[in-house]
């Protein structure tokens, strides 16, 4: 046996399979792993670098199955803000993921991404992408173009992407509220097929978001059938996660059955006061389907608040035609009144977050031209100004040219815990790393929060079970061959953490604070985090699956 590039010795090996942890050493050579009996490596050749992991857990690198990190490394001239082009906020955003132990990110979720599109649609879509992702990140014809753009910017961890249905629809039809014509649907299927052939991870939908919400079930079935032919999953932000969550889950089940695609439900929740407690019905439904042989899973983030765009709080027809049309409607008092009525009375088929919760549960995360609004609720801002909350939201959207993100405090802890504990649930941050403001702390804290709060403090999950949800289960669902487990020959993506100290420190006021207890992170065989700080190594790659 020759020596190793790196040896991690003395730790408790939790290998990502769910099996009990055991003492073992782990050797790294040429980006691959070897599992060794304690002390074996030092008797047979040693290593160029040795990490003492006594009192620590050694696990596979965490797989974040649900991110919106499609463009963050593409922002700024150097890609991470280290040149000072963004005041350092970009650097903090880029490093937040790897500092919490994530070695692979899966983006393109909720139907939104940076590809694919017909060439003639690319210029118009770039303007929309600047708003969604916080800067000029580009839009690409296919997964190969997306991957090439990322390959030009060094990164610490790995990235792959789903194909977003909303982006696909905008890339063929534009942001219009109508069914796809047969020729348009064929084009969408062809673009999806090409990107999946190039290595994209699956198909995602965000059926509460325009323009994806303008599509009927049959359109999604046709696209999911393309994913099924590639053996890749249909990943969905349900059409409603609030009062109609059970109906929306049944639509997803129908799409999976008719298309033949495996089903993965994104950030499963039952949000809003009319849906609290309904995980007691949705989770048994999923469990029964699995018992019948259906391939269905979900992911969850360990918080009772979500985050999205302020424009998503408005009825779907308000966004018909894109940002320009939305801005024009917001400037029309009669259209504002119509929006106000829609929120108060509801619109068939629309989730209606505000109607299910209230403006007092919607706080501003990022409004670049109005930093003093950040951290305050729409209801509070409106009361201070003596204004109606809808008018306050509309004025803010117009002043910010649509570029406003929010935090929605819409869930209860009991539902979060039930989803976390389900044996088919994996972990995803749903992180939205957009420069400026106060992003949701889940981008910096999700995985340490699970290990600290829900494993160590509450005992909701066992250590091995939690690690499996973060690693082996996630890798298996998304076809990350050779990742998510520690075994001979696997890719050398690892985390060394202190089970007695690991904890999330990020808060809604300081959302990018790095966690405690994540000592070492290895990606692609190189140490990218040591003693909780980045090393500067950039071995990450774009994964084609």
Image (cartoon, rainbow, N blue to C red):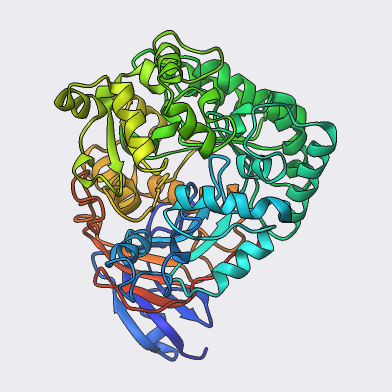
Which residue is at 49% across, 22% downward?
315
Front one among 380 and 535: 380
Q: Is residue 211 left or right of residue 88?
A: right
Q: Number of labelled discs? A: 0
Which residue is at 41% across, 71% downward?
522
Q: Quadrant of the C terminus?
A: bottom right
Front one among 373 and 517: 373
Which residue is at 69% across, 24% downward?
216
- Residue 121 image offset from top left, x and y in percent: 68, 50
- Residue 409 image offset from top left, x and y in percent: 29, 29
Which residue is at 32% across, 24% downward?
391
Q: Is residue 26 above or below residue 476?
A: below
Q: Is residue 83 left or right of residue 317?
A: left
Query: Do we see residue 489 in this rendering?
Result: no
Front one among 68 and 527: 68
- Residue 152 image offset from top left, x and y in percent: 55, 75
Q: Is residue 212 above or below residue 495?
A: above
Quadrant of the rendered image containing residue 228 = top right
């Amino acid at each position: 046996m020759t020596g190793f590039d790196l040896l991690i010795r003395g730790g408790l090996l939790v290998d990502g399979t769910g099996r009990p942890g055991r003492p073992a050493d782990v050797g790294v050579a040429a980006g691959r792993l070897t599992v060794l009996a304690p002390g074996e490596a030092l008797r047979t050749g040693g290593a160029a670098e040795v990490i003492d992991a006594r009192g620590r857990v050694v696990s596979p690198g965490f797989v974040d199955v649900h991110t919106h990190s499609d463009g963050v490394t593409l922002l700024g001239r150097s890609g991470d803000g280290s040149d000072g082009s963004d005041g350092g906020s970009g650097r903090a955003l880029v490093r937040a993921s790897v500092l919490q132990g994530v070695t692979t990110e899966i983006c393109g979720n909720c139907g939104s991404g940076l590809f694919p599109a017909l060439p003639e649609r690319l210029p118009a879509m770039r303007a929309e992408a600047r708003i969604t992702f916080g800067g000029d990140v580009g839009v690409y014809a296919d997964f190969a173009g997306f991957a090439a753009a990322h390959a030009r910017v060094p990164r610490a961890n790995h990235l792959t992407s789903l194909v977003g249905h909303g982006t696909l629809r905008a890339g063929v039809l534009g942001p219009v509220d109508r069914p796809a014509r047969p020729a348009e649907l064929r084009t969408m299927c062809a673009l999806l097929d090409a990107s999946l052939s190039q290595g994209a991870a699956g198909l995602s939908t965000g059926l509460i978001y325009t323009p994806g919400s303008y599509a009927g079930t049959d359109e999604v079935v046709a696209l999911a059938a393309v994913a099924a032919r590639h053996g890749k999953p249909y990943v969905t932000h349900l059409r409603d996660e609030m009062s109609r969550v059970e109906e929306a889950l049944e639509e997803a089940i129908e799409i999976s059955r008719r298309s033949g695609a495996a089903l993965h439900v994104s950030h499963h929740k039952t949000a809003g006061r009319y849906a609290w407690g309904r995980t007691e019905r949705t989770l048994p439904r999923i469990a029964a389907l699995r018992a019948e042989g259906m391939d269905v899973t979900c992911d969850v983030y360990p918080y009772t608040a979500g985050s999205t765009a302020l424009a998503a709080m408005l009825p779907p027809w308000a966004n018909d035609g894109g940002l320009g049309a939305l801005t024009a409607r917001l400037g029309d008092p009669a259209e504002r009144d119509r929006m106000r009525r829609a929120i108060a009375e509801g619109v068939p088929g629309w989730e209606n977050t505000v109607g299910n919760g209230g403006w007092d549960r919607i706080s501003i995360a990022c409004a670049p031209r109005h930093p003093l609004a950040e951290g305050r609720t729409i209801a509070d801002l409106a009361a201070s100004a003596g204004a109606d909350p809808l008018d306050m939201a509309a004025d803010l959207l117009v002043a910010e040219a649509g570029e406003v993100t929010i935090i929605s405090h819409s869930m209860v802890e009991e539902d979060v815990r039930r989803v976390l504990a389900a044996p088919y649930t994996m972990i995803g941050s749903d992180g939205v790393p957009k420069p400026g403001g106060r992003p949701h702390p889940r981008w910096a804290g999700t995985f340490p929060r699970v290990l600290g709060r829900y494993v160590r403090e509450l005992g909701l999950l066992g250590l091995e079970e939690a690690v499996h949800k973060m690693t082996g289960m996630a890798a298996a669902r998304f076809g990350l061959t050779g990742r998510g487990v520690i075994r001979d020959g696997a890719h050398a993506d690892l985390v060394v953490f202190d089970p007695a100290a690991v904890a999330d420190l990020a808060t809604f006021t300081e959302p990018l604070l790095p966690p405690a207890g994540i000592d070492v992170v290895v990606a692609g065989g190189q140490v990218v985090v040591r003693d909780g700080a980045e090393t500067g190594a950039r071995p990450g790659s774009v994964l084609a699956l």
